[in-house]
Image (cartoon, helix red, strand yellow):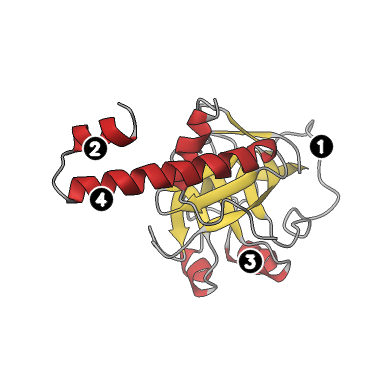
Amino acid sequence: MTSPLAEFSACEVSDALIKSGVGSGGYLPDITMRSPAYDDLTVKLCGPAYTVQMVDARDDTSPKPKEHFVDAASSGSVVVIAAPAEAKNAVWGGLMTAGAKARGAIGVVIDGRCRDLGEHRAQLFPVFAKGSSTLGQGGFTRPSALNVPIKIGQDLVAVNPGDLIIGDADGVVCVPADLVENVAELCRKGREVDDRCMADILAGKGVAASFKLHRGK
């Protein structure tokens, strides 16, 4: 089923989340598009989150998944990975993209690093990450928990399994599952207002006057 938010940009969704009382606007900070290209305006990611918590490889107290984290991804999902903040290695590479595509996952969002950019781009697989690395995961980090609530970035933005992930050239936004319908309605209203503002601004009526007329400020 197509999400009611599929037609809206990450910016529109973030604005609507602010109006819904989500102070962060759902923004997952500093995570940008790496594949299929940097800032490809034709790419739009929209799907439910399948979450993965990574830990330091030396951590022998955190749980270990019974299956490979990529093999557990469901069709139509967006893999969302929280890696340790200090990790310099990648937690996602070309083989992970191949496995995720085979299972029908539609993209990956990484609070951390990826590698093998050429392989992701060759497969036209959407990859959003904070950075890239030449280092693989072995000896540095490992998966710990799958499909659990995770926190992203220094602002600790919550991502829960099934939350809707929106990603495009502007960035990545997480929409709590129970807010999707309300956010979609706010997006529709916001787009109508912005369209009227744009028409008046292009007609030379001025930004301030257009905002006051259509936005009330």
Left-right relation of 63 to 44? right
In the foreground, 124 or 192? 192
Residue identifier under label 3: 95
Residue at x 19% of width, y 51% of height: 202
The amino acid sitting under disc 1 is Pro
Q: CA distance from mark 4 to mark 2?
A: 9 Å
- Asked if residue 2 shows in the view, the reply is yes
Q: Nearer the viewer, mark 1 or mark 4?
A: 4
Amino acid type, callout 3 = Leu
Which residue occupies 56% across, 42% down? 185
How many numbered circles does the render carry? Answer: 4
Mark 4 or 3, nearer chain start: 3
Q: Which residue is mark 2?
A: 210
Which mark is on residue 199?
4
In the displayed structure, 154 sits above or below 132; it is above
Indicate the position of residue 158 as horizontal and vertical percent values.
Answer: 62, 32
Residue marked by disc 1: 63
Q: Residue furthest left?
A: 204
> How many residues crowd around disc 1 within 10 Å: few (fewer than 14), some, or many (20 or more)?
few
Q: Position of residue 1 (x, y in %)?
A: 70, 60
Judging from the image, what secondary structure is the residue with disc 2 in?
helix
Q: Identify which residue, 5 or 74, lies in the foreground.
A: 5
Q: Is residue 11 visible?
A: no
Going from the N terminus, do you reach mark 1 or mark 3 first?
1
